[in-house]
């Protein structure tokens, strides 16, 4: 039981962070459940005025299924969400995209490395290596761009709209990825998780194309869509052939 509580703590922290972002972008919910507030207060020493998202709802993992692989995915998601949360609070749409996508890419590389360690399917292993090779280059590009393009000091015209769009996308992606990485088959867990992850990246890139102004970041957003859409279709086809 102690191990289960320890393994779920990173997910709880992700849940808390997501709730805090929603409280910044939307009106507070006056009817928040008292028990949820107490849970947040005990783990975060603060109270979020929005309901937290139960990351394991409908797919709790037992002692037998909470393997080293699942723990690695949990830790990866926690790190990814922390990084993405930082970007989603930015004022400038281009800087928000770069910082958020940077964390998103780092999460993709972590997931791909987990697949290389635990997976067995040749197609998914190759896809994982392709993700690493492609996204590490883009990670360096975004790190370099952010070093020369700090966030705006004040909110801009589209700041709230961008934050709302990213928050909605993050909510959907998190729920789907939590269900995916609970899969006991390593190759399916990777394919399902990375599928949701890629869809999230395309959604983020679409937001950048709608609100962003910087030419380099807009080109990167389009490149992400062009590269990841075929991989989305590849994973969808693979999953159709490799059902549980």
Image (cartoon, grey):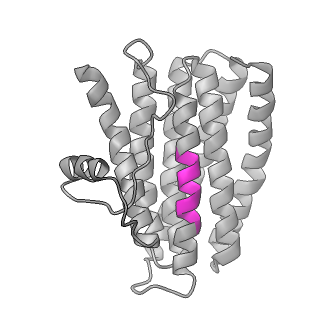
Identify the residue shown where x is 57% and y is 20%.
186
Q: Is residue 6 above or below residue 76?
A: above
> Can the viewer see residue 128 in this picture?
no
Q: Position of residue 20 (x, y in %)?
A: 37, 61
Specify whether 136 is left or right of 46: right
Q: Is residue 137 above or below residue 184?
A: below
Q: Position of residue 47 (x, y in %)?
A: 25, 59
| Between 105 and 54, the one nearer to me in the picture | 54
Q: Is residue 101 above or below residue 129?
A: below
- Count numbered badges in the picture: 0
The answer to if 230 sits in the magenta stretch is no
Q: Position of residue 52 (x, y in %)?
A: 39, 51
Specify whether 212 is left or right of 179: right
Residue that lies at the very extreme toward the top in this rendered image: 64
| Between 136 and 128, the one nearer to me in the picture | 128
Q: Which residues are magenta?
A: 165-174
Q: Quadrant of residue 194?
A: top right
Identify the residue shown where x is 47% and y is 66%.
88
Q: Position of residue 21 (x, y in %)?
A: 41, 63
Residue that lies at the very extreme toward the front in this rendered image: 31
Q: Quadrant of the C terminus?
A: top right
Specify whether 15 is left or right of 141: left
Q: Is the magenta region chiefly helix, strand or loop?
A: helix
Identify the residue shown where x is 59% and y is 35%.
193
> Can the viewer see residue 49 in this picture?
yes
Q: Quadrant of the N terminus?
A: top left
| Between 207 and 101, the one nearer to me in the picture | 207
Identify the residue shown where x is 18% and y is 55%.
45
The answer to if 167 sits in the magenta stretch is yes
């Amino acid at each position: 039981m102690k191990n289960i509580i320890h393994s779920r703590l990173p997910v709880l922290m992700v849940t808390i962070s997501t709730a805090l972002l929603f409280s910044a972008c939307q009106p507070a919910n006056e009817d928040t459940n008292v028990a949820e507030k107490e849970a947040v207060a005990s783990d975060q020493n603060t109270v979020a005025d929005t309901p937290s998202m139960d990351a394991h709802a409908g797919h709790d993992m037992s002692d037998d299924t909470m393997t080293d692989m699942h723990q690695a995915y949990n830790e990866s998601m926690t790190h990814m969400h922390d990084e993405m949360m930082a970007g989603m609070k930015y004022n400038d749409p281009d800087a928000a995209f770069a910082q958020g996508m940077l964390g998103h890419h780092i999460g993709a590389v972590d997931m791909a490395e987990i697949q290389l360690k635990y997976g067995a399917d040749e197609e998914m292993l190759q896809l994982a290596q392709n993700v690493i090779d492609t996204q590490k280059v883009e990670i360096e590009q975004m790190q370099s761009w952010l070093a020369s393009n700090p966030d705006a000091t004040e909110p801009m015209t589209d700041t709230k709209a961008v934050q709302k769009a990213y928050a909605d996308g993050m909510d959907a992606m998190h729920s789907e990825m939590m269900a995916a990485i609970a899969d006991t088959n390593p190759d399916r867990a990777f394919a399902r998780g990375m599928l949701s992850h890629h869809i999230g990246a395309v959604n983020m890139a679409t937001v950048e194309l709608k609100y962003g102004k910087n030419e380099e970041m807009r080109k990167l957003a389009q490149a992400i869509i062009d590269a990841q859409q075929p991989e989305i279709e590849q994973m969808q086809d693979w999953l159709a052939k490799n059902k549980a």
